[in-house]
Amino acid sequence: MRRFVSLFIIFFCLPFAFSYGGFMSGEKSLRVVKTEWFDIIFPEKCESTARKIASVADSYYSEISSKLGTEPYQRFPVSITSSIEDLNAFFSPAPYNMICLYDTALDENLDSSEGIESVFYHELTHAVTLNMKSPFWRGLSVMADLFTLPGISLTSFWYEGAAVSFESLGEGGRLNSPFFTQVVAQAKIDGKFPSWRDVTGARDIYPGGSVAYYFGGAFANYLQETYGMEKYGEFWKRAGKSTTLSFCAGVFKKVYGLKMSRAWQDFYDSIEVPSEFGEIDYSLVSRSMSMDVPLSPISTLFLPLFSFGRRIQEKAGGSFQSRA
């Protein structure tokens, strides 16, 4: 009995202990600015950033939702801190939807015309796409927001692809930086173009999980330009209400009417490289690049939970957490 009581006390106290090292740890005199759809939480020293976010948050939410063919339907908390001296941000649905921003100097590797607002736009794209749920799954959100089908059937290749492509629809964003897009073109030039299964975000060799940003962003942009934004929005709606035993490949085929391997080949063919490099046998390239640890269906259940830790560690290629 004593052991049971001791274990109960330990597990009861652990969450409180961890909270002292949390995102807002050390911040004093927290304030809140409310908009129609957001509660923006910040310390006094981050008030300027909070006001910037408050001025664009609702319009960004409406804009992203409109592009994807959905409508705003829920509030989001946005936490801002300057306690971490590194521009970063993340969105997480676990245990509830939240967007967190690090208020510091803009990373020189990022091609952004609007600074922290662009970072927020990236994270908000995550929030919108991962919450395009059927009424049934929306109902489960009463208990926890992590009940989301895209977290089961999709991987960070799709999450980051949507966010990177949307941040780049204007003049800024990573897809408008030749240094960022060169990674994809160089893979084709070098004859080391990965298969779509190799860019899920589980890669453990260079460039690591950043392939989800490079190739995910480029592939999402290709889909939007080739088949239209309406079809792309339909993909996320389908992913949010049902899945198949083949997961992302099955969702993709139901929406686009072709296999992922065929779409990936078409995407590869669309990438322009200098003519002197000639043509490469894509079928050989795909097989030669199957180096990643396969991402099992069960492991995808935990992607929303562990994405924060992964994003903190990955800095290659100007990628950062969920905007990052």
Image (spheres, rainbow, N blue to C red):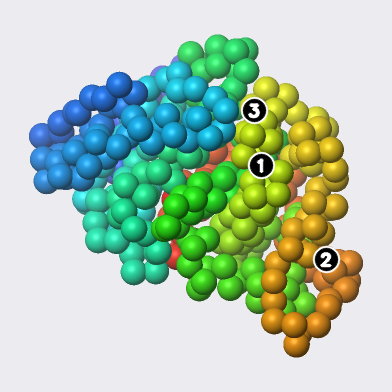
Instruction: Label 3, secondary structure: give it.
Output: helix
183 is higher (above) or lower (below) than 278:
above
Question: Label 3 is placed on what type of residue?
Answer: Lys
- Secondary structure, mark 2, is helix
From mark 2 to mark 1, how far is it between C-alphas? 27 Å
Res 40 label:
none
Quarter of the view holding residue 79: top left
Q: x, y percentage for residue 213?
A: 56, 57
N-terminal label among 3 and 1:
1
Label whose residue precedes the other's in the sequence (2 or 1): 1
| Residue at 34% over, 30% down | 58
Q: Where residue 131 sits: x, y (%)? A: 53, 27
Side of 305 relative to 56 (left or right): right
Give the residue at mark 1: 228
Foreground tag (3 vs 1): 1
Amino acid bearing label 1:
Gly
Q: Is label 2 or label 1 in front?
A: 1
Mark 2 = which residue? 286
| Count of numbered marks | 3
Q: Where does residue 196 sit, x and y in percent of width and height? A: 75, 56
For label 1, count other residues whose C-alpha is less than 10 Å away and answer few (under 14), some (14-19) or many (20+): few
Q: Is residue 216 left or right of residue 275?
A: left
Q: For the point 15% across and 44% down, which residue is it?
A: 48
Q: Relative to 74, is 34 on the left or the right?
A: left
The mark found on residue 237 in the picture is: 3
CB contact under 8 Å: marks 2 and 1: no
Cα distance between the residues tagged 2 and 3: 29 Å
